[in-house]
Amino acid sequence: MKKRLKLKSFVMPSLYLVAVFTLVLSIFFVTKNLEKEEQPENLEYVSEEIIPQEDIPVVNVESTIIRPYSDTSVKVAKYFYDYQGDQEKQKNSIIYHENTYMQNSGVDYQLDTTFDVLAVLDGTVVEVKEDELLGKIVQIRHDNELISVYQSLSEVNVKKDDKVKQGQVIGKSGTCELGKELNNHLHFELYHNGQVIDPETSFDKKISELQ
């Protein structure tokens, strides 16, 4: 009976040590395997940008309205009629035709020689026509209910439904029956939300800044 008790007291600690050793050994090998998986050999590091600079999205910036010409020699021949403007400017804003006085709804730009007429913003050509009094006409619709109108053209380089870019040459200045005393010129009008506005107070502004 005593021998059996001695055997049991010897065997149990041994089994316990074997179990602990096996567990420690298992943990050791599992840890080694995980380290190999987390740090693969021949790992190549990227030193360059993943997205090239030219592919970085650019935030859309609202353009400002430019003048409908690029020739710096062009001058204002007749101003927009402003009900609140000074008298001298109002006198220069009256059109006389066949014994009738009319208030100028745009601005007339004049030069002795023919000059290029430019689109003041990106847009879509909504009308191209020729009128007996106003000459050749181009009308362009822009964003946010802005419409630009170019009259008294001698040449037209666009057609209806064309997409145009800001600064694109859409035609050339010319003459027309209404305001023929101005000779070579461009009559230019701007409409915002259906209301005619003074182009001279709109240049270098964003559409969102127009009143």
Image (cartoon, grey):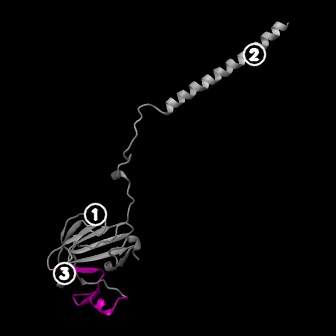
Q: Which of marks 2 and 1 precedes in the sequence?
A: 2
Quadrant for the C terminus, please. bottom left
The residue segment tinted magenta is 84-111
Q: Position of residue 204 (x, y in %)?
A: 33, 74
Q: Is residue 55 left or right of residue 109?
A: right
Residue at point 38% right, 61% down?
60
Q: Of 98 and 52, which appears nearest the observer?
A: 52
Q: CA distance from mark 3 to mark 2?
A: 120 Å
Please name the residue that numbered disc 2 is placed on. Answer: 12
Q: CA distance from mark 3 to mark 1?
A: 30 Å
Mark 1 residue type: Lys
Q: Nearer the viewer, residue 16 or 84?
A: 16
Q: Is residue 7 above or below residue 211?
A: above
Which circle marks residue 151 in the picture?
none
Q: Determine crowd level at label 1: few under 14, some 14-19, many 20+ residues with C-alpha closer than 10 A.
A: some
Mark 3: which amino acid?
Answer: Glu
- The residue labelled by disc 3 is 177
Q: Is residue 64 magenta?
A: no
Mark 3 nearby-residue class (10 Å; few <14, some 14–19, many ≥20): some
